[in-house]
Image (cartoon, rainbow, N blue to C red):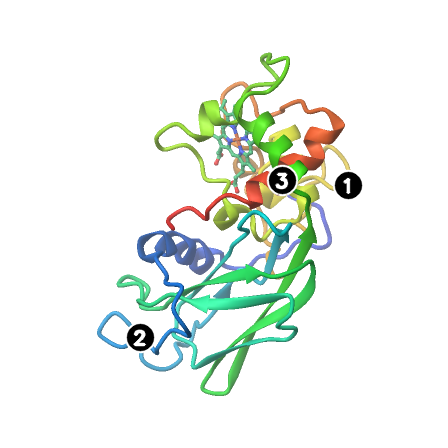
Amino acid sequence: MTPTSGHTRTVSRGIAGLIVAAWLATAGCSDDAPAAQPQGQDCVIGLPADAQMFPPVIHTGFNGRDDFLGPISLNFVPDSWKVADPSIATVEQHEKCNPVFRGIGALVHPKKAGQTTITAVKNGMEFTLELYVADYTADEIDLGKKRYYEPENPSATRRACASCHQQPGGADHSPLAIGFYDDAIVRAVATTGMSPKCVSQVSGSECVCGGQDPGCYEIPEEQRVLNVPGGHSWEFTATELDAIVPYLRSLTPKGL
Ligand code: HEC
């Protein structure tokens, strides 16, 4: 079956996937003042023809207690960064370039709930992402954590997420994996087992993109459902369901 959604178009996903993978190898940042421009053979010089920043949208949260971090990957080294509303977030560039990609990563630090844009500038060109910082509560994080590690009334459909995800080699659902997707999409991944790239928003059969272009692309059928034997359709109480995605967003991005 091919996707029928009118929103669907085909774009290359190669770079985005590679950038995320490469991020894992170079994560590591400092709390020091603005990062000096990294230099050396690991850093690409200038602006490559396929220059990009990933993801184009970041969803994260704020509650005044927990750390919510939004990882960004680039295959170049920006000259500078701009946050349209600096009261909502700051951005911190890593110190070192990735030896494979020769670009650099950065981390968004939310400061309060709201919406703004973050722009990397290189040679006068601008690469902008939309940042959405949701207002989460500390109680939500605690409840989400409980469902994740020690669910009440455990059963085959109320398994602890940790029983798989915290095993060695467990699948990543940290902000590195889910930052691009809004809460509704990540909830649907947990309750239906649809791939986050392909959550059905219209009907059970129609596959549409995850909401925010330019993440839109054709998804082969075998990639539309998570590869989890027995499925990935977990049950939640209503409050747990509200809490589980905020909890995942409070996790340290994989690789940091
Ligand atoms: C039986 C093991 C198992 C359990 C239990 C489980 N997961 Fe998963 N989950 C997986 C596997 C394996 C993948 C990756 C599958 C793939 O990539 O095709 C995955 C993927 C995901 C993803 C998508 C990550 C991405 O970006 O691709 C999310 C989100 C997620 N799980 C959340 C949860 C939550 C929340 C719970 C608990 C309510 C949970 N999972 C319980 C095995 C499990």
Camera-near label (2 vs 1) is 2
Where residue 32 sits in the image (x, y, percent)? Answer: 38, 68
The residue positioned farthest toward the bottom in the image shown: 124
Q: Kindly tell me whether mark 3's CB lies below 8 Å from ligand 1.
A: yes
Q: At x 73% / y 30%, what residue is drawn?
A: 239
For the N terminus, the quadrant is top right
Kindly indicate the quadrant of the structure image that contains residue 14.
Answer: bottom left
In front of the other: 100 or 68: 68
The type of residue carrying mark 2 is Pro
Label at residue 150? none
Give the residue number, with chain letter if any, for mark 1. Answer: 202
As measured in the structure, the alpha-carbon distance from the residue carrying label 2 to the one carrying label 1 is 46 Å
The type of residue carrying mark 1 is Val
Asked which secondary structure carries label 2, the reply is loop
* Count of residue discs: 3
Say whether disc 3 or disc 2 marks the residue closer to the N-terminus.
Answer: 2
Q: Residues within 10 Å of mark 1 (few under 14, many from 20)?
A: few
Give the residue number, with chain letter if any, for mark 3. Answer: 245
Give the residue number, with chain letter if any, for mark 2. Answer: 38
Where residue 224 sits in the image (x, y, percent)? Answer: 58, 37
Q: Quick check: 220 left or right of 203?
A: left
Say whether disc 2 or disc 1 marks the residue closer to the N-terminus.
Answer: 2
Q: Is residue 96 visible?
A: yes
As measured in the structure, the alpha-carbon distance from the residue carrying label 3 to the one carrying label 2 is 34 Å
| Looking at the image, residue 195 lies above or below residue 66 | above
